[in-house]
Image (cartoon, rainbow, N blue to C red):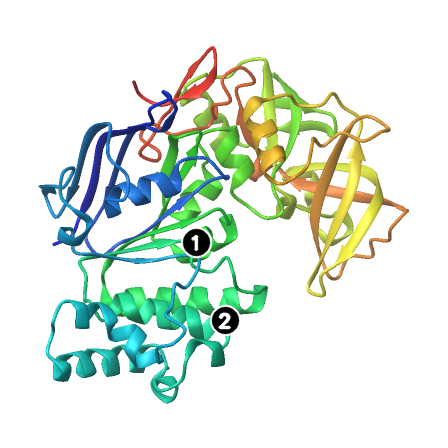
Amino acid sequence: MAEIQFDDVTKRYADGFEAVKHLNLQVPDGDLMILVGPSGCGKSTALRMVAGLEDISEGQLKIGGQVVNERAPKDRDIAMVFQNYALYPHMTVRDNMGFALKLAKVPDAEINQKVNEAAKILDLEQHLERKPANLSGGQRQRVAMGRAIVRSPSVFLMDEPLSNLDAKLRVQMRTEISRIQQRMNTTTIYVTHDQTEAMTLGDRIAVMRAGILQQVGPPSELYGHPNNLFVAGFIGSPSMNFLPGEIEGDSVKLPIGNVRIPDELRRRLEGGPGGARGGVIAGLRPEHFEDAGLVADRASRGVTFTARIDVLESMGSEFYAYFMVESEQVSSRELEELAADTGGTDLQSTRGGTQMTARLAAESRVRQGQDLELWFDANHLQLFDPDSGRSLLAQAGAGTSTPTPTAGGLQGPS
């Protein structure tokens, strides 16, 4: 059994900076857990603490029920796959994959058996006598994985292993990693800053921000029931749109019109942490918009409005339509961090207002530079507290982390 458990784990450096703050996280035996978040959020530091490459300042780290805080990396029965392949250029694929076993003085016959088995799993059998320079990027990454597999570890640790690959190879390797992990059933922690990679790979996802765990859960839960603005804005592609709103009776007054709150959302709102109240931040995912001309009985299920399409991107199977809404800009530390991480400054236009994105069906007659009647599905509306950033629709016990607001923003348990 190789369950991994972080019990109130903190990493504090000599200058007082805390890279990871009071992390409580459990990775069940055989699970593939994704640690995701922007650069500098502490995800790689958490992984390196599991590997024994970073000391733990406070708390306990357990692997298989045993505290490993003081245990050397070589005694933790883990294998790590890095962003750079770290292959020996003068060695063949076979020698690279079996090198760790050779250092451990494993008999040659056993090494060959393990390497051949791993090569079969990774489809590298025909490349065993080649050197890394003669392999593609995807093949070199599979060799690096093979080097980890032959050791038959209790835990795999993967630190952004696909970052050096082009887009097509990343998609192929995501599938490969998922297939291998399911076949071997080895407990795995996988670190990435790519939320698409996280959503497609993991059994569960742990979202981190500034060293603090924000939410843990299956991909569908983080997508449909984000705990706070940060998770809502980080998960999903294209990212969620945000508008200021005001709850008035059974409706939310938004810049695009008055949206009647569906009964299910009303019940969640009344039972949530903030109850039904006035000012809110509304979250609207691009995929929950549609060309109104393609929606039957649209009036009973959402809100219809007209917008001028400034930019239109055809993806073949769908359109991404960008338009402006006249409204005050939503201000939040969480959203500012997300904008900075993606290289943008904010969502404001020189004309004022807020830029919005809609993901429309290929059947739409949308045209760039023209007005289009759009519809938003109110069943997927998200509502957040403008002060703390917390979801007003969060169910009790949703996720495994419920950060509490402080004057400095969302904070984890102390």
Determine whether 17 is above or below 31 in the image: above
Dot 1: element? loop
- Residue named by callout 1: 160
Mark 1 is surrounded, within 10 Å at the Cα level, by few (under 14), some (14 to 19) or many (20 or more) other residues, namely some
In the image, residue 169 above or below residue 11: below
Q: Quadrant of the C terminus?
A: top left
- Identified by mark 1, the residue type is Glu
The foreground one among 44 and 202 is 44
Q: Is residue 249 visible?
A: no
Quarter where residue 87 is shown = bottom left
Measured as percent of width and height from the top left, residue 338 is found at 58, 34
Q: Residue at x 90, y 47 (%)?
A: 369
Task: Indicate the amino acid at tag 2.
Answer: Gly
Give me the residue at 36% from left, 72% from top: 143
Quarter of the figure that contains the N terminus: bottom left
Question: Where 99 sits versus 44, above or below?
Answer: below
Q: Which residue is depicted at the point 34% across and 53% down?
A: 203
User: In the rendering, which numbered label is found on residue 251?
Assistant: none
- In depth, the one of 261 and 208 nearer the eye is 208
Horizontal and vertical percent position of residue 177: 37, 65
Disc 2 versus disc 1: distance between alpha carbons? 14 Å
Residue closest to the far bottom: 126
For label 2, the residue is 137
Q: Residue at x 72, y 38 (%)?
A: 356
Q: Residues within 10 Å of mark 2 (few under 14, many from 20)?
A: some
Measured along the vertical axis of the image, is residue 107 above or below residue 334?
below
In the displayed orientation, state which residue is furthest to the right: 369
Left or right: 1 in relation to 128: left
- Visible in this render: residue 203? yes
- Going from N to C along the chain, the mark reached first, 2 or 1, is 2
Q: Can you tell which quarter of the image residue 186 is in?
A: bottom left
Q: Seen in the image, is 350 located left or right of residue 330?
A: right
